[in-house]
Image (tube, rainbow, N blue to C red):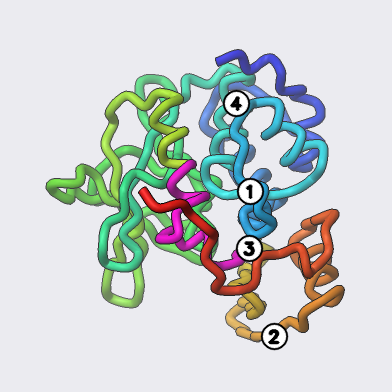
Amino acid sequence: MDDQQLDPTAYLERIGYSGKVEPILDVLEALQRAQHFTIPFENFDIALGKGIDLRREKLIQKLVHSRRGGYCFELNGLFLMALRNFGFDARALLARVHVTGVPSGRSHQLSLVTIDERQWIVDVGFGSNTPRTPVPLVLGQEISAPGQIIRLSESEPFGTMLQTKNGEDWDDLYSFDLGHVCPGDIAYGNHYTSTSPDSFFTRDRVAALPVKGGGITLLNDKLTKNVEGELTTTQLEPGQPYIDALRTHFGIELEARYNDLRPIGHEPHTANP
């Protein structure tokens, strides 16, 4: 992959990062936090019927220059480009999502980063449950980050499971292994996730962005703010107020009308096999 097409100055400006850039853990943590807090998780190109184009130049134009967000294949794809550009030893992994209790196919992209012979799982694209810090590839070690406690555990036959603590329990988020991932694997996962009528992303509109002390999420027309333990929910009105709310809360500039969006709950048309 030729990552030189990514303008590092434009990328760092986009994520609001002005610190040093070298392949060490402190910088990895800072870059992850900076991108996660500035580029929103969202699927509005799917809702607009545009699909998800993972070509490098398209990702850079959309997420960096057009200041849009994206979902895991876009957000972690861009982050992987940036890490490699800055000299990190990093590669893509694919994961199965377990949040519903039924494992998905390998429909989530994340990154494996190696620093001084230690390996770290890094993710900037799992919505409101995105790990907010690099996770060392060590089973059973609890990692505390703002608003979450996470760990990795063994989970046969799926490999390694990322879990989040919920009271006294641990909820499964996604499982992965360290097998080689090629561009074709990512293309397959992205195609299913962005086009299948069975995919959550083709039926619902979603957005998420962390803020200091919490986060803001959108599911269809329900906007939820959870900041410093205070939870508020707002029902968004259709039309221009909905478009304005995307800009206000997530920085999403759609350059589209509300009526251009696929109706909530509407499944995309697919030809019979």
Residue that numbered label 2 is attached to: 234
The location of residue 125, given as percent across then percent down, is: 54, 49
Residue that numbered label 1 is attached to: 70
Residue 131 visible in the picture: no
Q: Residue 231 lies in what quarter of the image?
A: bottom right
Q: Distance of mark 3 from mark 4, alpha carbons?
A: 23 Å
The amino acid type, in three-letter code, at marker 1 is Gly
First in residue order: circle 1 vs circle 2:
1
Q: Distance of mark 1 from mark 2, alpha carbons?
A: 23 Å
Who's the residue at 81% across and 30% down the image? 10
Q: Secondary structure at mark 1?
A: loop
Who's the residue at 52% across and 49% down the image? 194
Vertically, is 226 above or below 272?
below
193 in magenta? yes
Residue farthest toward the front in the current orientation of the protein? 272
Vertically, is 219 above or below 78?
below
Q: The N terminus appears in which quarter of the rendering? A: top right
Q: For the residues carrying marks 3 and 4, which lies nearer the camera in this image?
A: 3
The location of residue 159, given as percent across then percent down, is: 20, 43
Q: Which numbered marker is on residue 81?
A: 4
